[in-house]
Amino acid sequence: MIIRRAPRRRARIEVIPMIDVVFFLLVFFMVASLSMVQYRGVPVNLPRAATGSDPPARPATITVARDGQTYLEKEALPVAALGERLRGLVAKDAGTAVVINADEEVAHGRVVDVLDEVRGAGVGRLAIAIAHAGARSAPGRAR
């Protein structure tokens, strides 16, 4: 009597499940990294503009709220004290950039006062935050 063996099957590495796992990990880490972004200003309604660019990588954020109160990062300060605090930042890093977030309802003169203090502190890189006209962003988020 002849007993026939089943032919040996070659081992295969299934690629499709591995691709699924790698894609899942990629999406997980992308979503996790988005939640790590820190917004360092006070939420305000930014005016919209068709032109503009993204703010510098690690700027100091000055916020002028609707009521005229000014903040450096999230600390309330009078406008006169901004210059002294910014001089300290510029002394540590000469390339310090400042982004001004001003609510669209704030009087123009208040923003000019803040600009004067920033320039007087020796800050060379300055930007004014806007919300892009085509984009719908949450209030207080500079794009």
Image (cartoon, helix red, strand yellow):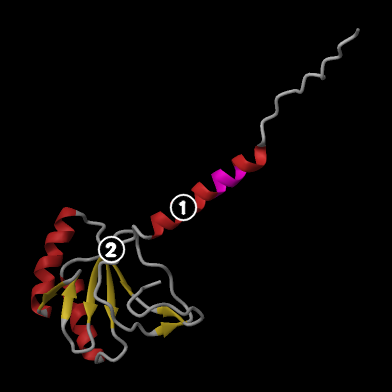
Q: Amino acid at mark 2?
A: Pro
Q: Position of residue 44 (x, y in %)?
A: 29, 81
Image depth: mark 1 or mark 2 in front: 1
Disc 2: which residue? 59
The reply to whether dot 1 and dot 2 touch (C-beta < 8 Å) is no
Circle 2 SS class: loop
Residue 72, quarter of picture: bottom left
Image point 55% across, 44% down: which residue?
22
Image point 47% across, 82% down: which residue?
133
Q: Nearer the viewer, residue 27 or 41?
A: 27
Disc 1: which residue? 28
| Of the image marks 1 and 2, the number of the one nearer the N terminus | 1
Vertical side of 97 occupied by 71: above or below = below
Q: Position of residue 86 (x, y in %)?
A: 15, 66
Q: Which residues are magenta?
A: 19-23
Circle 1 SS class: helix
Image point 90% across, 9% down: which residue?
2
Residue 6, quarter of picture: top right
